[in-house]
Image (tube, rainbow, N blue to C red):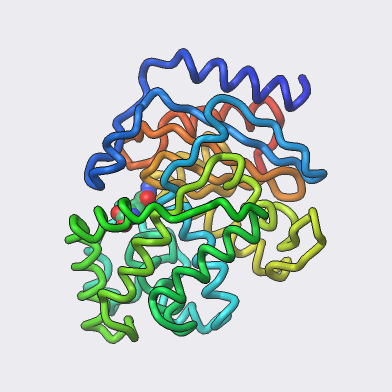
Amino acid sequence: MKNIASIVADIAEEMRGMTDRGQVANYIPPLACVSPDRFGIAVVMADGTVHAGGDAEEPFSIQSVSKVFSLTLALGMIGDALWSRVGREPSGSAFNSIVQLETEQGIPRNPFINAGAIVVADVLLASGTPAEAIAGVLRFVRGLARDETISIDASVAAAELATGYRNLALANYMRSFGNLMHPVEQALGVYFHQCALAMSCRQLAMAGRFLAHDGRDPATGRCIVTPQRARRINALMMLCGHYDNSGEFAFRVGLPGKSGVGGGILAVVPGTASIAVWSPGLNAKGNSQLGALALERLAARTGWSVF
Ligand code: DON
């Protein structure tokens, strides 16, 4: 096998030349302005070495990738009690689908579809006001990445609020079943702001390290979550992290991964590496087209698939 540095450099170069890059999300207006030419990749190894290529230092809207961090925080607050309000099964439906909520008593299938993440945001409100809950998410992610420059793009959060009719419907629907404890505006305020976190591939890969190392930050030895919880979050990422595209992602890449409509994907190689890729063009299921292709090539050339 070639060394990781040259594999990452090769993949960044190959992605630069791709013409079929998918469609940039346009239902959140500021995301539509991002150039589809972008591609970034960062791989953080267990010893802290970072292999980065392309636009790895450029911040992008992490969107649904944030659901990994909010889930981790919510589990830290209420533990397994979360699972009485959110399921752990793939939905087989689009990320913003409402249909299953009707027959399943307002309990979302998993914490990574929008409905599930809105319930998780509602849990985070137990820590204080919406502003305090949002500050808690930002503090957590900054701490994980050990980077105080990470910020929330308020214009993205505002644009989501202005156009988020579907999320408003999901939240109101769940509230009617008694599965939101706080006003829908507050749960959505937390949710929209966490989705508006702006991070580079390098920052995102750094923040994901604890998932690759039994719940510990390998740089400090600090325990973020127990090994069991890290395994479970990885299991959810594998089965639900790409919505109704999760089977395809597991088939092609074979790693736990979480995507976002900003075009980012966080992927975990247990015991070995944390990876972030970013390319804004999405496939028909709303996941980064080149991001998945880059991860497929990386897994094939390194033998990193968990299977
Ligand atoms: O709620 C939304 O629609 C967005 N803030 C997040 C959706 C998302 O990233 C789906 N991922 N592929």
From what the image shows, is residue 295 above or below residue 133? Answer: above
From what the image shows, is residue 12 above or below residue 126? Answer: above
Quarter of the image where the N terminus is located: top right
Residue that extends furthest to the top in the rendered view of this protein? 17
Q: In this view, does 244 lie to the left or right of 176?
A: right
Q: Which residue is drawn at 77% across and 19% down?
A: 2
Q: Residue at x 65, y 68 (%)?
A: 229
Q: Can residue 93 be seen in this view?
A: no
Q: Can residue 78 be seen in this view?
A: yes
For the image, the number of numbered tags is 0
> Residue 75's quadrant in the figure?
bottom right
Residue that extends furthest to the front in the rendered view of this protein? 149
The percent position of residue 261, horizontal first and vertical second, equals 36, 45
Q: Which residue is drawn at 69% across and 57% down?
A: 210
Q: Which residue is drawn at 34% across and 61% down?
A: 192
From what the image shows, is residue 215 above or below residue 121? Answer: above
Q: In this view, does 127 lie to the left or right of 31?
A: right
Q: Is residue 295 left or right of residue 241?
A: right
Quarter of the image where the C terminus is located: top right
The percent position of residue 302, horizontal first and vertical second, equals 71, 29
The percent position of residue 52, horizontal first and vertical second, equals 64, 30
